[in-house]
């Protein structure tokens, strides 16, 4: 293998590792424009697939209910309404730099529970303030989701 | 840093402050950088969060947030590599599930096993397209050392995967 071949292979490998970075989950912050076309498309495609899947299930249930002709009036509609409880995604607010109590109330008002998972020392943020959060601000989560906060130690 | 009222107002969803804008614009690139350096998803997320926290604390004094974040991430990943040797193995497991080609996987294994500074030089030079001077500044070494680290790293790769 020549030096050039090794370098090219290294470049390709690094690109592939970078592509495997954990950005593909829906909890990522979505960058506004450029460079994000790939992931944006994939995300939209997933949502589309879920919607199409749900529609398919609903129509199947309804048509099966109608064609069997046993009870077209009551039971099928009730089962479909219970199966599709909409959980709109919540945008995670930024809490970095806030006091712990302040951060908790900000999250609470956004219908997110928080937990303090560990304590950091030595960052230049004041004691008792939030140093980091996961998932990060701008992520989309389901209502009632849990956010981990890291707090600067006293 | 005092969290001001304006920040709380922003959280409730009206104005995007410059920090949040920077955060959203820089997060994906910085996460990729940290991930290539650590090979570990969790570690990469932690490091990027810490880097943004440090940036937040120095926001008024930092002229170039992107540059500050890059250098901070390179150094935080280095501290992490020093502290936690076992992450190397976790990283390999994670990469094993993620990488499609056997070719890439083989090279990634060797790459993640390299000493941190050698790996960092290869990542920054061949993936980040950083200049030698930028790499030397981030790693706190001389440009000559960058050259040495790169050729040592490449030699190890060649020894392990070269035909």
Image: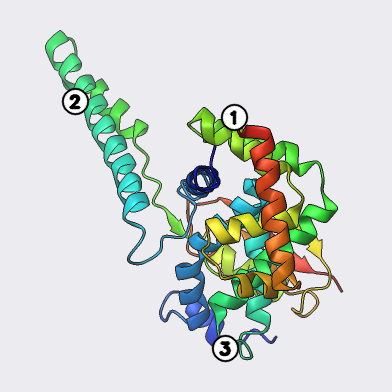
Image spot of residue A68 (x, y percent): 16, 9
Q: Residues within 10 Å of mark 3 (few under 14, many from 20)?
A: few
Q: Is residue B21 above or below residue B6?
A: above
Residue A81 in sight here: yes
Going by the image, does B124 lie left or right of A140? right
Q: Which element is circle 2 on?
A: helix
Q: Residues within 10 Å of mark 2 (few under 14, many from 20)?
A: few
The residue pinned by badge 2 equals A59
For the residues beneath circles 2 and 1, the answer to whether they share a chain is no
Q: Residues within 10 Å of mark 1 (few under 14, many from 20)?
A: few
Q: Which of pointers 1 and 3 lies earlier in the amino acid sequence?
A: 3
Identify which residue, A101 or B74, lies in the foreground. B74
Going by the image, does A45 lie left or right of A123? left
CA separation in Å, label 2 and label 1: 58 Å
Image spot of residue A44 (x, y percent): 30, 47
Identify the image quadrant of the N terminus of chain A: top right
Going by the image, does A73 lie left or right of B111? left
Q: Nearer the viewer, mark 3 or mark 2?
A: 3
Image spot of residue B154 (x, y percent): 65, 48
The residue pinned by badge 1 equals B163
For the residues beneath circles 3 and 2, the answer to whether they share a chain is no
- The answer to whether mark 2 and mark 1 are in CB contact below 8 A is no
Q: Chain of mark 2?
A: A
Q: Is residue A97 above or below residue B91?
A: below
CA separation in Å, label 1 and label 3: 47 Å
Q: Chain of mark 3?
A: B
Residue B77 in sight here: no
Residue at 74% of width from left, 73% of height from top?
B142
CA separation in Å, label 3 and label 2: 57 Å
The residue pinned by badge 3 equals B63
């Amino acid at each position: 293998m020549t030096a050039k071949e090794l370098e090219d292979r290294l470049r390709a490998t690094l690109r592939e590792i970078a592509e495997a970075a954990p950005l593909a989950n829906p909890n990522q912050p979505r960058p506004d424009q450029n460079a994000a076309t790939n992931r944006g498309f994939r995300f939209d495609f997933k949502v589309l697939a879920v919607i199409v899947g749900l529609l398919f299930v609903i129509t199947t249930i309804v048509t099966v209910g109608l064609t069997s002709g046993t009870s077209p009036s009551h039971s099928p509609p009730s089962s479909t309404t219970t199966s599709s409880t909409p959980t709109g995604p919540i945008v995670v607010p930024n809490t970095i730099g806030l006091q712990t109590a302040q951060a908790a109330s900000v999250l609470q008002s956004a219908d997110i529970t928080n937990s303090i998972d560990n304590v950091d020392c030595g960052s230049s943020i004041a004691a008792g303030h939030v140093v980091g959060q996961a998932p990060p601000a701008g992520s989309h989560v389901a209502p009632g989701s849990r956010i981990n906060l890291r707090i600067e130690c006293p | 840093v005092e969290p001001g009222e304006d920040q709380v107002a922003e959280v409730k969803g009206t104005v995007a402050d410059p920090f949040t804008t920077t955060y959203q614009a820089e997060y994906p690139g910085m996460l990729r950088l940290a991930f290539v350096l650590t090979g570990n998803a969790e570690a990469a997320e932690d490091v990027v969060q810490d880097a943004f926290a440090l940036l937040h604390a120095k926001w008024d004094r930092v002229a170039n947030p992107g540059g500050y974040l890059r250098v901070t991430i390179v150094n935080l990943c280095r501290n992490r590599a020093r502290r936690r040797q076992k992450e190397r193995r976790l990283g390999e497991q994670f990469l094993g599930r993620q990488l499609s080609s056997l070719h890439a996987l083989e090279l990634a294994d060797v790459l993640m096993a390299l000493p941190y500074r050698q790996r960092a030089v290869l990542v920054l030079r061949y993936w980040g397209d950083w200049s030698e001077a930028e790499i030397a500044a981030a790693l706190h070494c001389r440009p000559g050392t960058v050259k040495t680290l790169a050729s040592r790293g490449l030699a190890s790769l060649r020894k392990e995967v070269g035909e």
